[in-house]
Amino acid sequence: MKYLGVAFAILLLGAVIWVLWKSPQDFEALLHITPAQIFQILFLSGIFLFSQGMILKSVLSAFGVELKIHESFSLMIVTFFANYFLPFVGIGLRGGYLVKKHRLSLSDFALASISIVVVEVIIFGGGGLLTQALIKLQGGSFDSILAGIFAAAVMAGLVAACFPLHLLKIKKLEKFFRGARALRTHPRALGRAVLWTGLTYFSFAASFQIILHGLKLPDGWGLSFLIASLTDFSFFVRLAPAAAGSLEAAVYYVGQGVGLSLPQCLAVALSSRISLMIWFLTLGPIYLYFVFHKWKSDIGYSNV
């Protein structure tokens, strides 16, 4: 599976190069993004990553783990940095650190991870559904498939969080449902997770808004929030490192609905990727050292 993902990423890179060669004028628009806009995009990408770390911190507090702010941010950077090379490796590194450093059980780590996913799916899916409704009320087009995806995501998240465990017939799913409802008995942790997830959603959408404006493409907050919602879901579909392909497909599906071409959508996706990669590639190796080398005497790893 690992080699299949790498092969898929190579094929995708070849396809991007081919599109770039065929439509260089669409990618030349990247040069039109001003230094001020570049700073704004990088700032919002930093807020996105910081908020992701604070979500982790908030959820883990419900399991008796109190991460420091810099610790949660560094774990998030390491997670994304590692995932950019091999799917899900970052999650494993994060879990290993929390288990060794904070004595978090693997079971609780799984429950916490499920809780984060459920909150994120409900917030991003609900935001996408609300955006679709507002666009329709203002006379815009309504994408029933997109609305269906968002509605299904929200419904699945709510059912998972509220489903009575005593009615569950499939015992193998019990851990998933326990994770989905783990925060219900910790309202303070749940409230913080929801607020930080909301900030994550807004900063992600705002970065797309600036990217679209900088590329002189059709923009608008409705379009930006729709791209942010579907793109976030694409992070869960990791056929290749860095969710290669799934992110671009999400941007293209939303973008083509307003007349954006494939090269234009790839330019938008590439801009978003670069803004995040600057953070990962700059801070990733540094935090990887501090998390798994400088602290290895405390963590308990001997061969990291």
Image (cartoon, rainbow, N blue to C red):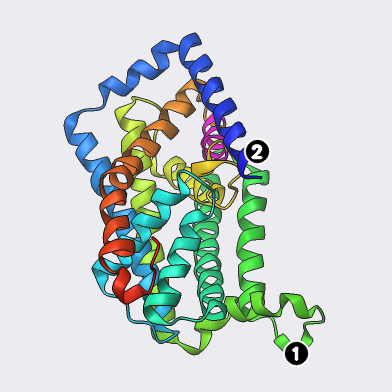
Say above or below: 155 vs 89: below
- The region drawn magenta spans 246-256
Q: Residue at x 54, y 37 (%)?
A: 254
**67 with respect to 201 (left or right):** left
Q: Position of residue 199 (x, y in %)?
A: 35, 61
Q: Amino acid at mark 1?
A: His
**90 with respect to 245 (left or right):** left
In the rendered image, which residue does mark 1 sit on?
A: 166
Q: Residue at x 55, y 51 (%)?
A: 233
Q: Secondary structure at mark 1?
A: helix
Please state which of the two labelled residues, at mark 2 or mark 1, is closer to the viewer.
2
| Residue 138 in sight from this viewpoint | no
Q: Is residue 119 a member of the stretch shown in magenta?
A: no
**Residue positioned most to the left:** 36
Q: Nearer the viewer, residue 216 or 17?
A: 17
Q: Amino acid at mark 2?
A: Leu
Q: Earlier in the sequence, mark 2 or mark 1?
A: 2
Q: Nearer the viewer, residue 98 or 270?
A: 98
Label 1, residues with CA under 10 Å away: few <14, some 14-19, many ≥20: few
Q: Residue at x 52, y 26 (%)?
A: 13
**290 with respect to 228 (left or right):** left
Say above or below: 93 vs 241: below
Q: Position of residue 165 (x, y in %)?
A: 71, 86
Disc number placed over residue 4 in the picture, else none: 2
Say above or below: 180 vs 223: below
